[in-house]
């Protein structure tokens, strides 16, 4: 299984981007889908996640600005990012976690927010 993300790019502060991530085939035993990010010189951090049941989690830094959505039928996960700030600049990675099995990771997509 391969995950492929799209939608990254360069945007001015205050702008919006939508990231999408799709899997190459159906994945069984999914627990949750998530987006992580890693800024230069910083550790990777969990940005948002959504369980198969629809429960969501957001990092405090993105609450009210980002919205995660997962499509269990299409095996996709999206991240709508509004009111972007320069501190949101990072490589964003999608992830699919499974019950008792290793997670899948996408290769990352760059998001750059200019001030």
Image (tube, grey):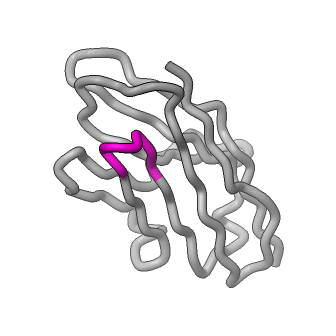
Please say if 85 is above or below 96: below
Of all residues, the one furthest to the top in this rendering is 101
Quadrant in the picture for residue 38: top right
Depth check, front residue: 47 or 43:
47
Name the residue located 40 percent from the left edge and 33 percent from the top edge: 96
| Drawn side of residue 19 relative to residue 110, left or right | left
Please say if 27 is above or below 49: above
| Drawn side of residue 93 relative to residue 115, left or right | left
Residue 102 in the image: state x and y as whole percent: 36, 16
Residue 16 in the image: state x and y as whole percent: 65, 75
Name the residue located 40 percent from the left edge and 72 percent from the top edge: 63
Quadrant (top left, top right, bottom left, bottom right) of the C terminus: bottom right
Residue 42 in the image: state x and y as whole percent: 63, 44
Residue 52 in the image: state x and y as whole percent: 23, 45
Depth check, front residue: 22 or 109:
22
The magenta segment: 71-77
Name the residue located 61 percent from the left edge and 47 percent from the top edge: 92
Name the residue located 46 percent from the left edge and 25 percent from the top edge: 25
104 part of magenta stretch: no
| Drawn side of residue 8 relative to residue 37, left or right | right
Count of labels shown?
0
């Amino acid at each position: 299984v391969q995950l492929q993300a799209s939608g990254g790019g360069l945007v001015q502060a205050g702008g919006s981007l939508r990231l999408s991530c799709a899997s190459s085939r159906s994945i069984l035993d999914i627990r949750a889908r998530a987006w992580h990010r890693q800024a230069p010189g910083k550790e990777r951090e969990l940005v948002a996640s959504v369980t198969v049941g629809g429960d969501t989690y957001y990092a405090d830094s993105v609450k009210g600005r980002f919205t995660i959505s997962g499509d269990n039928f299409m095996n996709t996960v999206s991240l709508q990012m509004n009111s972007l700030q320069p501190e949101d600049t990072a490589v964003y990675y999608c992830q699919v976690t499974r019950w008792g099995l290793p997670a899948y990771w996408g290769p990352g997509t760059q998001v750059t927010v200019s001030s």
